[in-house]
Structures are given as structure tokens and as C-alpha cells.
Image (cartoon, grey):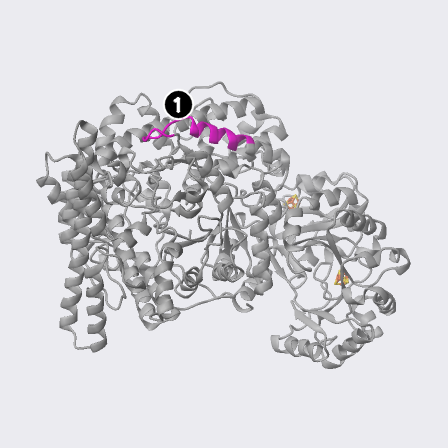
Amino acid sequence: MGIIFNIQEYAVNDGEGIRTTVFLKGCPLKCDWCSNPEGQLPYPEIFQNKELCIKCYKCLEICKCKSITISPEGYPEFSRDNFKNCKEKECIEECIKNGLKEIGYEISAKKLFNKIKSNYLFYRNSNGGITLSGGEPFIQPEFVREILTLAKENGFSIGVETCGYFSYENVKDFIDDFDFFYFDIKTLNAEKHKDCTGLDNTVIINNFKKLCVNSAEKITVSIPLIQDFNADKNSITEIISFCKENNVNKARLLAYHNLGISKYEALGRKYKKEFAFISKDESESLKNLFIENGIQCTIE
Amino acid sequence: MESQEKDFSPREVKGSPSTERIKFMRERYLSEPLIIDSEYINLYTKAHKNTDGKNVLERRAECHAYALENLTTSIKYPEPFVGSKTRFVRGAIPYCNYASQYIIREFNNEEHEAQDKVTDLGTGGGIAKAKELSQSGDYEFFSGKFLLSKEDKKELKECAEYWLGKSMQDVGDDLWKKVFEKAGYIENGWKAVLYTAPHDPAPEGRYVLDFETALNEGFESIINRMRNLIKETVVTDYESAEKIYFWRAGIRVLEATINWANNYAKAARAEAGKTNDKDKKLELLQIAERCENVPAKRPKDFREAMQSFWFIYLAGHIEGAQLGYSPGRFDRYMYPFYKADKEKGIISDIEVLELLEALRVKMTEIEYVASFSWEGLGSGNLYQNMILGGTDEHGRRGDNELSKLILQSAINCQTTQPTLSIWYEDTLSDEFLLKAVECVKTGCGFPAWFNLKVYIQHELEKSKLPLQTIRKYAAMGGCTEPTLEGMSYGVVQAGFINHMKIFEFALNGGTDPRTGIEFDKTKIPENYEELKETYKFHLRNAIANWQRYWNYAMAAHRQVCNLIYSSVLIRDCIGRGKSLDDGGAIVNGTPTTLSTGLVNVANSLAAVKKLNDLNEIREACNKNWEGFEKLRKKALGAPKWGNNDDFADEIYSELFESYCGYVSENKNYLGVPYDPSMLAISTHTPFGKVCGASPEGRYAGEPLCDGVTSPYPGTDVNGPISVLLSAGKIDHTKIRGGLHNMKFHPTVLKGVEGSKKLLQLIRSYFGYPGFQLQFNIVDSDMLKDAQLHPENYRDLIVRVAGFSAFFVELSKSIQDQVIQRTEHSI
Ligand code: SF4
Ligand code: SF4
């Protein structure tokens, strides 16, 4: 069994062809800019859309585990820990405005695979397939291994997007079987990394090197461009050298945006910090640095 | 379908007219008001008064011929080829010979048809301008959006009164209302909006003339063929005598068309005489020369072929009250002229492009007036469909250089007509396909994509014609109904059937809950099975009655409005000596029966099956879910069509099969079984308006789903591929036509990669095989609309760098940001 929070069809930006992207839930990092915060915690959470709420308090009335109180603005407020342990979750059923949803569910690799397998004609015609994303897929190594095996048995292409923070030991037997990787390198500066993601980058850098031994040509380095963090010539030049040392010659830049902000509120969390946007010119000039160094690079 | 006056927001691809001439023509069109022109019908009526006692075919021919020959010619310089339906840039002919009741009613400002109340018309652009002018006092306002001058009003009124009792509608009414045992059912059906309003005011269309022969042979030669046939025929009985009448009628209309072209030649010469501008003079003289040559003779070059095509096409448009009358495989039959000129080096692609762009403007200038509710349903759109690509008769690649230029002309000159389609085959060239996607990216909504293989199977089964013939002449008549070019009867049909209304009958013992009218009394169903069977019972009756009614109307059509000009230009009317209404066409199986809302019925049945408490659901629907909110939440959670979920998909497939079966049980006016078809145009809104809440969770009055297989908005939560997998489960070869709308945010289609992925999507779906796909590329206006009407955009996904979400689930401020990005970032 594994836990996922979304399956996206016709994902056209996660590799070659028409793909189905599965988002696995749970991530060891907590990046300040994360736009999919619902992917961070490895268990189902309540997702509360206050714009739909009419303050009828039906949810509150039905709740037996007393995890709901009323906020100063009059919205129901959830004790997230209580909700996690609640079996009934009747509040969700009770909300006729559909303002409450549970995000994240458990599913077996087999069931998941059967669901996405039915798109085979689309994969076949486009050299597409499956992409695992998240969250961090490799913190569910058994689940990932099962999906990978099923995909290979059916001749489907399968790739993965990883933040790089996982135990290599757990995946070393099969990781090289993936057809491609989007591997996040946020910065090579350990301190900054810890500051903005919660953890230092030693594990990531080591994992990257290990993976490069056999799979360097399958890796695209993925870099979120964040102002005052890594969107400067120096930081990027460091990443470029690091790529070259490890024979990786593809990169993808993702310019910062804050579109995920409303999801934080719905999950009862705070959006830690807003960053300034990166201009088109800035990202283009950083992209050119890669190209000048013989590394293919795209901006999303 | 897009409304006529839409502005085009910035996209990845944005074109502009390639020359000043086209820019001028397009802007002139956009700034002109819509006007009613009664000249044609006035002349026609005059001739009708003078031809009493003539054979029906000859009388019809004479009236049209006389009117055509005497129309005021209107040369709208700087158009590169001439010919205009009316004296105005955007004029419409009120065809009193088809129906005059609605015109009289408009003059008397009487209550409109029951459906007018539930139909919305657009109000932008030229319509707004007309409103303004009507306040000046010289014009009146007619039918919600047209101007009508004082003199025209007088003429039109006289004509309309003359045709009372003589028009096709009145002649038909006099028959079916008196002899058809189910007449009451039909009239009640209109009151309850089980059916769309009577289609008599604009019933023609959905066919394509034999342009190949008309262009290449020339009218003089066709006239000679008919003369010879007359000579050779020995009259022995009624039938052989009728042939003579038909050919005489045919000769009369073709001669009139040549005369009409000659009138244009004279007018062009006269204009040339009036100007001192040397270039203009030369151009007008060249136009005059062309008009003297075509359509009488074969065109000498591409320019002359354009002029000839336009006369041939337009004359048919004038003869009947057309809707969906189409140019067909233009890139095939025009190609030899293009190729010859290119080889000789006498025309450049830039010049061809200008001509093609001019054609777009001229086709968009044609307007039509029908009863108020039908205009609302068609959004004023004429559905002139030009279909590109496909194959030749041997199955080889059908696209050519001209096909690409046609796409380019649509990218450059953004107008609503003609609508473009692609006959998809894997053999089409990459350049052509990528150009077609580029056109999609402008956001104009076309080309629409059709799977040729599916249609070929359908037509092989229905018409049993040789494969090569079907490949060569496969075309599109109107929005999404395929037809064989130059050899098929027009898909003249009665209009649409409202599935949801039928479902309401089934749920309520055969009574319409809104009006209280009882149709066929049935037992109140108690469970899913009974409900489904009762629905099928009512469906079968509603179809049969509708088809039989229309056959009476067609009998009147044969007498009053039989198309002579079109008959002569459709094979094998001349050979058989028979008009279209007498079975002259090679294919007479084209008339379809149309319906809207089957997906809603399938979803409703799925909810009933899942929730398994029909009595409670019925009560909830009667109360519009008030007090049943939790039940509604459950109903919404029940399986829905469009998620690749067999629970719902199998119900839909079953209903679809039943529908196809019932439609084919009855014969059309030409003695061939009716053909099933499904599309929506804009019927889903007025149809939904008259229906109460439905078990799927829909509230009373909400629109039904559009298209045949498009899911009800917001119920396809699994994503675009699942929708196509559901759609791929039905047997598309069973129906003539059908459509599937998809909406995409431009980010999904970005760059050549995005284009290729769209093509892969189309190809994969067509592998199932699906029949049709069309794409809406979302623009900022649409997103703003989505903020106001989230229920219609539930499926819209926005993707921005690693982030994706359903647009309607984003908070308002984030939505505003996405809108800004849509405007600026591509
Ligand atoms: S690594 Fe990705 S999923 Fe994890 S917190 Fe950072 S941005 Fe979010
Ligand atoms: S039941 Fe829904 S609408 Fe009512 S208070 Fe709770 S969240 Fe808000």
C-alpha cells in the first residue's frame, strides 16, 4: 500500500509524450516556496475551502472526537491531530457545500496501476507513460518498486521526480531501472538549504552522485528559481559545475510563483515567506548560463 | 460556437489580415449592422403571382430565376471577386415562401413561440449598432437584432401576407394538423419544449453541391446536357413527362445564374467607367471579364475559379433558406486550378492567401433570419463547413499546399465563417497537422477534428456505395454531420429532441411536470429498471412522432420549396430526371434525427441505480433538492459518465444503442431509414431551462450537457483522458455526426511540443475509434466567465511550473493572478 494525493492525466510537462503523473504524499523537506503543501505530510489531511463555507456548523455538531472549534472569524477550525486519528470523518459527509475534503488516500500499487493502465493507447502513440511525483516518491520505496515493476512488465515508460532526500539503501536495487529522473538541486550551499527547506543537502548531494554512476544521462536537474536564494549567477554557476562533474547535461528551471498560497490556508498552515517574482529576462539569462556550458535547459 | 463579435484575446498564435484590402473588408464587416433585405422575396413573390397554373417544378424555378436575374447587383470594392446575397454587407433575406407566420407575428408584436421565452440572443457588435440606428427613426428593429427600412417593411409585410396559407409551413400545417393522428402530441411537444420550435423558416442545408462538375464543366455544357436529354426522351407516362419538366426547370435556373453573373459583369464595367483610379479601373475590368466567362464556362485560372466558385456557391445560398449549407472539400476541387497557375508561375501564394482571406470575409457576411428561437439556438451561425485533408479515392494523403494556405488564411483573417474541419487520417502530413494546431491555438475554436475511418464505416453500412467514392467525396454538411459531397440529399430535419424532458415524462407517469400536459400515460416507476424501461418507451414514441410529423412537412416542402438549382448540381438528379425531393440524389439516407441531453439521462439513471430509493429522489427533484441537500451530495457522488467508470458508461452505451435503434425504425420522406445523430448547437441551454431538477444532482433550469459525449460540466473529475476513454466506449460508427468539446488552458499546448501532444491525443482517441474532437483554448475572458459560472468550468486545469489545480478551486485572488498570466505570459 502507498499513499497518494492526486493522479493527473494528460500531464504534458513531466517528460516525453502524454503522461499520467501520480503524486505521492509525504516529503522530508519543507521548502518555503513549496506550491504543493498537500504533498508534504505522509497521511490524509482535511482540506478546508473557506470560500464555500456558510458557517452552518453542521460539521461541528456531528463531530464526536471534538476536533472542531470556531475560529475568531467564525469558521470551523480543525485540530489536525485529532482529525488524523478520527475513524468516522463524518464532518466531510455532513458539509453540503462541499467545503471539506479529505486529501490523500491509500491505494495498492496494483489498483493504482490498473487505473492508469487504461490509458495505454495514449502512451503508445506518444511515447508517453507514467511519472511519479510528489511529495517525495522514494520515501515509499516498496510502493514505488511495485509500480515500477508493473510498468516495466507492461512496457510502459516510467520516470520520477525526486527532491533527492531519501535513503539510497532502500532503492538501490531498482532505482536505475527508471527511464528518466527529474532531480531537484536547490542549492549547493548547505546552510542556505537547511534554512529554506528544513534540512541540509548532504544526503541529496550524495544520492545524486550515486545515481549518476549509472544513470547520469537519464537525469534532468530541476531547479526552482528563488529570489535571494539561488536565482543569481554564482549559485547557478555552482550547480552547473556540479552537473558537469557528474556528467549530467540536462536542466529545467521553474520560476517561483505563489499560486499555492491558498492551499496553505486550507490545510491550516502558514505560508512562511513570499519571495519576489523572477522576471523573464532574469530567468532567460540564467538559462543561457547553462546553454553556454553545454547543458540543455528549459524554463517552465 | 463563438458569437460573431467576439474579440480575440492575446494567444500564442495571433494573426492579422495579410493585406490592407482584407483588413479593410474585415473591418467593414465588423462595423456594419444587420439588415433585412426584402428585394429577393419581393421579386420572387411577384413571379409567383404570375405563374399560377405552371408545373410545380417549373414554377419554383421561374420564381427563383426571375428574382435572381433582377436582383440589384452590389459591387463592394475592393473585394477581389464579386457577388452578394443582398444589397447590404450584412443583409438577410426573409424567406416568406418557407414560413411567414413568424414574420407577421413579429409585425404584430405578438407573443413569440413558447421557446422564445427561454432563448437568449447575443447583443454585441453589429447587433448593438442596429439598435442604435433604429433609434434614428428611418429604420425599425426586427426580430431582436435586424434593421428594417420603411420601404422594405411595406414590401415584406405584403409578401408575408401573400404567403399566408401558401408557404411551406402553412401547406404542411394544413396537412399534418388535419390528418396526422399524433398532431396533438407534436403541438404539446412544442409547448413543453420536448422539441425545438418548428424548423420551417430555415430548414435547408447540411449538403454540399457538386462543385467539381459545376466548375470544370461550366453551366453552358450542363444546360446542353439537359437539352439533349429532353430531345432524347420519349414521353410515355407521368414519370417521363415529369423528367422533361425537371430539366426545363433546371435549364431555366442555370440560365438565370449566368444572367446574374453577367449583370455583375455589366455593373463592374459601369463602375470602372466611373473611376479615374487606374488600378481600380483595371481590377474592375478584370472582374467584369471573369463574370462574363464564369460560371458559364470552365475557369481559365485560379482567380477565375474563385469567382466561379463564389457564384456557384452563392446562388444555392440564395435559392433556399439555408443553415449548414457548406463548401465541402474546397482544398481538393480547387487544387487543380491552384496547381496549374503555380506551375505556370502566374500566381503567388501571397496572392492566393489574399483571395482565401477575402473568401472568409464574404462567407461571414452572409446572414440569415429565422424564427427568433432558432437564431438563438444557432447563435446566428450559418455553419458553413469547409473540410480539409482526408484522402483521395485511393486512400492516399489528401492534404496539399492549398490546404495549408486555407488554414493560414483562417489564422490571419479571424472571422467566424467558414468553420474549418479536418478529416483526420494518419497519413496527413506533419506540416499540415501542425498548421492546423496552430490555427486551434488562435482560440477561434476550429478546425474541428473528424475521424474519417469512422465515417467511412458508417457510410459503407448505410449507403453501400463503393469505398473509393466515399473516400473521395466525404465532406461535412453543417456543423458536425458528414455527407457525401455533390451526391447527397440535404440533411433536412425537424430539429432536436429533448432527452431530459422525456426522462421527466418517465419519472412522472407520462406528464410534463412544468406544464401539466399529459403525453402517453405510463405507470409511475418504482425502481431503476422500471424507470429505464419507461424512459425508453417514451423515447421511442417521441422519436417516431417527430419523424412522422416531419415527413408531412417534407411533402409540403416538395410542393413549395423543392430546390431546383441545387438539384441540378447534385448527382444524379439530371441523369434520373428527378429533383432532390423526388429522390434524384444518389444518397437519400442523410436526413437525421437529432437530440440533446442523453448524458444527463444516463447520469440520472446511474444515480437512481446507486442510491436505490427512487421515491425519495423523485420527491427531492420535485422540490428542487430543497431540504434534500445531503441526498444531493450523495447523488452528485454517484458514478458519472466521463470518468471511465463502467457503472455509468454502460448505462450510457445502452441508451445510446436504444436511441440509434429507435431512430432507424422509421423511414424518411424519401423512403430510407432515418439516421441517428446527436449534437447540441445551443439547445442545451433552453432545453435545460424547462426541465426540473434531475437525479444526477442538477438543479431545475440548469443547462444540459452539450455534445454527444461531452460530460456534464464538473462531473468528469478524473481528467481529460478518462473522458475520452468513456467516449471511446460507444460505437461511433452508428451515428452520422456527433461532437466532443475539450477546454484547454494555453499552457497545456505551449510550443511545438504542446502541438505534437495535442495531435497524439487526437490520434489516440481516434484509435478507439472516437469520431470528433474540438478544442476551446481558454482565454482571459473565459476565465472571468469561469469566476462567475464555476459550474461550467469544473474541469479546467491550470498548470504553472510544477503546480496544477482546477481553476475553479483556486481562491479568487489566485484566480485573478492566473487570469493576468493568461493575458501576458504567452
Ligand atoms: S521538496 Fe518539493 S514537495 Fe517537498 S517540500 Fe520542497 S517543494 Fe514541496
Ligand atoms: S458543514 Fe461545511 S459549510 Fe457548514 S460550517 Fe462546516 S465547513 Fe462550513
In this rendering, the answer to whether A68 lies above or below B414 is: above
Determine whether, in the image, residue B612 is placed left or right of residue A251: left
Q: Nearer the viewer, residue A149 or B109?
A: A149
Residue B694 in sight from this viewpoint: no
- Give coordinates of residue B318: x percent, y percent: 24, 49
Specify whether residue B665 is painted magenta.
yes
In this rendering, the answer to whether B623 lies above or below A9 is: above
Specify whether residue B427 is painted magenta.
no
Say which residue appears at 27% left-offset and 33% top-offset. B582
Q: Nearer the viewer, residue B623 or B213?
A: B213
Determine whether, in the image, residue A186 is placed left or right of residue B47: right
Determine whether, in the image, residue B395 is placed left or right of residue A128: left
Q: Magenta span covers which residues?
A: B654-672
In this rendering, the answer to whether B478 lies above or below A256 is: above
Q: Nearer the viewer, residue B505 or B692?
A: B505
Which amino acid, mark 1?
Glu
Residue identifier under label 1: B518
As drawn, which residue projects farthest toward the right? A169
Q: Nearer the viewer, residue B737 or B808?
A: B737
Quarter containing the C terminus of chain B: bottom right
As drawn, which residue projects farthest toward the front? B232
Determine whether, in the image, residue B786 is placed left or right of residue A11: left
- Give coordinates of residue A243: x percent, y percent: 79, 73
- Give coordinates of residue B719: x percent, y percent: 62, 48
Q: Chain of mark 1?
A: B
Q: In what element is the residue under mark 1? A: loop
* Count of marks overlaid on the render: 1
